[in-house]
Image: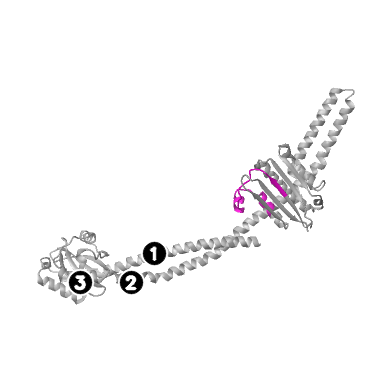
Amino acid sequence: MARSNTSVARAMLMFSVAGLVVLVLVGVTGVLVLRAIGTDEATRQAQQVADVAGRVVEPRLANGIVRGTSGSLLAIETLVNGGVLTDPIVHVKIWDANGEVLYSDIPEQIGSTFPLDASKLHAFATGEISAEQSDLQRPENRFEEDLGPLLEVSVPVSTPDGTELLFQAYLRFDSVAASARELWTAFLPVLAVALVALTLLQIPLGYGLARRVRESQEERERLLRHAIESSDMERRRIAGDMHDGLVQQLVGLSMSLSAGADSLAANDAVAAASLRDAAATTRQGIRSLRSALMGIYPPTLHRAGLASALSDLAAPLTDAGVATEVHVQPEAGALTPDAESLLFRASQEAIRNVTAHARAKNVRVHVKVPDDGAAAVLEVEDDGVGFAPVTEDEARADGHLGLKVLGDLARDAGGTLNVTSSPGAGTRVRLEVPLR
């Protein structure tokens, strides 16, 4: 249970960290989007203010303003100073299509000609309102430097005879920025509450999901252990039946054939030779059958003892030319059946791995019981190719669950299983099983 809680806590920690990162990213993105929306909305409101001012001025435009007649200029001057120049509008110009300033509330600018920038050209070409932050370094804006950052809005207007002009209103950019800030900060609490609510909603969902995944893994491992244990019991029964039945019958048959060959030797040498060949073939079959039984379950484990079972288990390695050393401390004869079974299972899995992967030249299998008699210790060492350490999740993903299941069985029995290996340095499997 402690391991399960640790696993769930680790999963929840990773989930929470990932959720926090996503929360920060979404929050920052949301703030940037809100600021952009607020700025766009504040700019649109500034355009509306300038458009209203332009529509107020347009009916007072006389044809003479194009020629610079004093009466036309005076009429616009009176209107602008009488109400158009009201916060946030701080400055007004009227341009013609050639870039000449026909009117300005700063008299020094009237009559000056400047190249039209892209914003003004766009307004003249499309008849749409355009807005941009004023470049105070441009020659036509040299008188606005003292006014600070400005937003200039260009509104297309026309004289009674249809001459197209451009009404340009300059608004304090600080005012526009403040309006934008008010707009997006008004929605900021809503964004924050939504993100916090989403996070609080995900925490129990993530916790429940992590627990279900962990419980599913544990259930799968329990089922696997149960299947292995059930398989062991069935293999034990089959091995015992075959050893006590078929193997003994074949042993008896071999002995009978040998005896028959001896009795016929004097009278029929050919028949005697045939019987001896049959006896030899039978004995070879017995050896093959016993080797097969070792792979199923060692019949000698609880009868002849662990030492004999481990020697039989290591025999195929010896036959393959691998130098094997099997040593079981005499005191290990007092092992409990459960301890013997677990020690054999671990040896079987380790030797199976040596046979399949290690390409070892030497294998050492030692079982000992310390002086205090509290535990039995198994060590299986080889000088093979070894392997790089893998995590439990990687082993599970690759389907390598033999030692993992043995580790769980050892832990259930109160013991420990440690596997030490590295590429080119062989492998050492150490199992400690309590005896008290």
Q: Is residue 403 visible?
A: yes
Q: Residues within 10 Å of mark 2 (few under 14, many from 20)?
A: few
Q: Is residue 211 visible?
A: no
Q: Is residue 397 magenta?
A: yes
Q: Quadrant of residue 25?
A: bottom left
For marks 2 and 3 on the same chain, the one whose residue lies earlier in the sequence: 3
Residue marked by disc 3: 56
The segment highlighted magenta reads 379-407
- Give the CA separation, mark 2 to mark 3: 26 Å
Residue occupying the far bottom of the picture = 82
Q: Residues within 10 Å of mark 1 (few under 14, many from 20)?
A: few
Q: Would you say 132 lies left or right of 114 here?
A: right
Kind of residue at disc 3: Val
Residue marked by disc 1: 32
Position of 367 relative to 166 (above/below)? above
Residue at position x 79%, y 31% from top? 281
Depth check: 203 or 100 in front?
Answer: 100
For marks 1 and 2 on the same chain, the one whose residue lies earlier in the sequence: 1
